[in-house]
Image (spheres, rainbow, N blue to C red):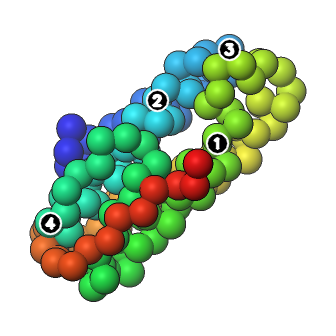
Amino acid sequence: MNNRRGSLERLAALRDAAADPRAAYLIRSRLRRALLTCAREVASRQGLERPMLPGQWAVAPDASAEIREVIALCRRVYQNSEHLCQPSESFDVRWEDGWRDLRTDLAQLENAMRQLPGDREGASGATTDAPPS
């Protein structure tokens, strides 16, 4: 899936999985896949190489405000969810609270993906940055 519809489908699947907080591991894997799909879509729209792993963001110097918003939201969700996506993180109140906090960011990301223009954008001289290790 490398289009807006695919990104929205992954975000919806993530939201559906979250309806049952006992599905913590399913939510964790879907979260990373949804972010990767969104990152690939915006990279494709800019004519950039699609990232292979979640947490790799590509932004062209002349990227639109919509593209920059999607990337900013992906970064925020990725950073805020890092502890939730660790296999050793126990399923407890801390996890439930963390997931609740991410719902707003995910809703904003879903809305931002819907706001992307229908045409793909091309750009050169792009930069790629990965999250700090």
* Real-space Cα separation, disc 2 to disc 4, in angstroms: 25 Å
Which residue position holds label 4? Answer: 47
Q: Residues within 10 Å of mark 3 (few under 14, many from 20)?
A: few
Task: Name the one closer to the observer, 133 or 2.
Answer: 133
The quadrant where residue 44 appears: bottom left
* Real-space Cα separation, disc 2 to disc 1, in angstroms: 12 Å
Q: Earlier in the sequence, mark 2 or mark 1?
A: 2
Residue located 53% across and 19% down the image:
26
Q: Earlier in the sequence, mark 2 or mark 3?
A: 3
Which residue position holds label 2? Answer: 30
The disc labelled 1 sits on which kind of residue? Ser
Q: Secondary structure at mark 3?
A: loop
Residue located 21% across and 79% down the image:
125
Is residue 32 visible in the rendered image? The answer is yes
Which residue position holds label 1? Answer: 81
The quadrant where residue 66 appears: bottom left
Q: Earlier in the sequence, mark 4 or mark 1?
A: 4
Q: Position of residue 68 (x, y in %)?
A: 41, 73
Which residue in the rendered view is the most extreme toward the front? Answer: 133
Which residue position holds label 3? Answer: 22
101 left or right of 81 in image? right
